[in-house]
Image (tube, rainbow, N blue to C red):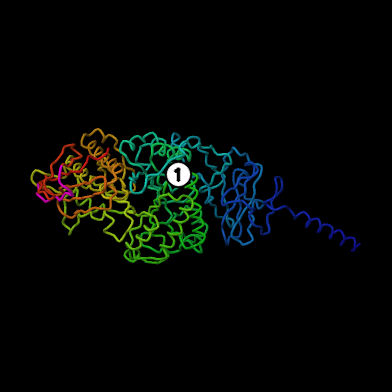
Amino acid sequence: MRNLYLLLISILLAGVTSCSKKPSSGGSSGNVPDPNPAAKDVPAGAADGVTFINGGKSAIFNLYAPGKKTVTLTGDFNDWSTDKKYNMTNSTDGTRWWIQIDNLDPNTEYAYQYQVDGSLKIGDPYCEKVLDPDNDKYIDKSTYPDLKPYPTGKTTGIVSVMQANQPAYSWTTTTFTRPEPKNLVIYELLVRDFVQTHSYKTIKDTLNYFVRLGVNAIELMPVSEFEGNDSWGYNPDYYFAPDKYYGTKNDLKALIDACHSKGIAVIQDIVLNHSFGSSPMVQLYSSGGTPTNNPWYNSTPTHPFNVGYQFNHESPATKYFVKNVLKFWMTEYHIDGFRFDLAKGFTQTNSGSDVNAWGKYDASRIAIWKDYNNFIKSIDPKFYVILEYFSEAKEESELADEGMMTWNNQAFNAEQATMGYNDAGGSWDFSYLFYDRYPIANPYALVSYFESHDEERLQFKNGMYGNSTTGYNIKDLATGLKRDEMAAAFMFSAPGPKMIWQFGERGYDVSINDNGRLGDKPPHWEYMNDANRRHLFKVYSQMINWKKKNPVFTSTTFNYDLAATVKHITMTDATNSIEVVGNFGLVSTTTTVTFPSTGTWVDNFTGTNINVSSATMNMTFAPGEYHLYSKTALTN
């Protein structure tokens, strides 16, 4: 009897052991995943994020999360179950987690999340769309129609969205040739404030405005997913997903396509110095809000201007991720260039709170940028790489030698000049428009500007703080706008690429701090009903088109004096000579103007001729008076 009892027990135990041997989660349709799978490498060909197979009826999910104990996939396809049978398989090196899900409808959008170590819920860092329970309800249906509802009651936090057969976009412009950097005129804009609808579709319908102005590139402030809706975009969290507040991904593609059809390049302002707290990559390794043992981020920032959580660009994980982000936008969206925000922050040399130390020559930072630049150029040799840098000139020179461009901020000196002040020892001297003031050999490496999203508006400063004397007051709108015209004549005449901040061409005079620095600003399209503002637009347009169409503006043979009251620029080449002159003072001033040659010269703004009888001529200019003379009339 005892032997029979033992025999029955052994049979029962054998049956239990046999039932526990279930196929792994990477098995074929109909198999039940093992709740405790053995380590097994990600199937060949499965990329980061979601890879669709079997005609979109199956998907392999692949998450890089080294050191985690369990990761469970949950979503619409399993009714948001967190049962252990949806535990993901750990790779043999312990860095990745993956699972295959079958029986999917390729035409259906599925929301999903990863549940890590039992409690943390995150989206997929590689997803191309997210749903946000707190912010999506404020997105207008006209901007993003048929937005998938958030799975309320099923989960919490940001969720990712996937779909095998996404609505396709057919590109119509396939032969676009980018402007050479020496002829580049960039228009920086914030989608949210450029048009009241804050939509790509409206900007697409407004492109003839840029054509009339003459710019040949637009720079979109950050458009990848950022926290909230009402933002400048420098608080990113999901890097492969366009922010839905501006429209669908195909709306963005249609805008880029339409720009190309009109000869306009599109530059993306991209934020890879840092992420914000809703980033799944931050959340994966966060202790009390601080990244701990995070493969991508520093626990403590290495420079004083950091916001959010700083990437460690010497980490192999970060380099891998960043290169995937760059390649994605280049290939998926046909972007023509990147403007890298806080590019000087790509350093592991810790400068603490010392801003000056942060800007010192940093060989390791140069190596990081050469690596990224080489990667970009391996995909597209003509791609624009523009850095917000502001470091020691020697460092910028090395980057320029590699074909990279850097921002050249001349806002303060231009503001002083248009306001009519020189009270700080040359404060209205904007000589650094010229590359020869730096130890930089590449004449087309500096993207110079008098306004950007970060700077106060020239005309606001004129109207609020402009200088005055008897009979001449820069606070008067017409007078201030005239001085803006004069500033534009000088800025566009210096060689190298140039940038305009949105609406500077019509004298935008709403302060950067109105409604809070980051707050919404009205576009004031009605400004174009004012004759003085329209004339400013005309001067911008004339200068931009002259710059693009006349090689003399790219000449490296020049001299200038931009420190005096009456400022001048002289440029010559084999095709022409120009003399730009303007009085930034408050009273009429007589000065000596040196022309490259005698004879008849054209005053291009008036269309009249002047006779230059001597190479040096005494000429008198009223306050705010400016001219662009040329030996032969400039081509429009």
Q: Residue 258's x, y, as percent?
A: 42, 36
- Packing grade of label 1 (10 A; few <14, some 14-19, many >=20) is many
Q: Is residue 426 above or below residue 588?
A: below
Q: Say which element carries label 1.
A: loop
Q: In this view of the protein, which residue sits in the foreground, 497 or 165?
A: 497
Q: Residue 499's x, y, as percent?
A: 31, 47
Which amino acid, mark 1?
Asp
Residue at 54% of width from left, 44% of height from top?
Answer: 161
Provide the residue designation for mark 1: 243
Can residue 504 be found in the magenta stretch? Answer: no
Q: Residue 380's x, y, as percent?
A: 46, 49
Residue at 36% of width from left, 35% of height from top?
Answer: 206
Residue at 68% of width from left, 54% of height from top?
Answer: 35
Which image quadrant: the N terminus? Answer: bottom right
Extreme residue in the left direction:
470
- Tell me if residue 595 can be seen: yes
Q: Is residue 165 left or right of residue 353?
A: right
Bounds of the magenta span?
588-599
Q: In this view of the protein, which residue sits in the foreground, 151 or 95?
A: 95
Q: Residue 13's x, y, as percent?
A: 81, 59
Which image quadrant: the C terminus? Answer: top left
Can residue 596 be found in the magenta stretch? Answer: yes
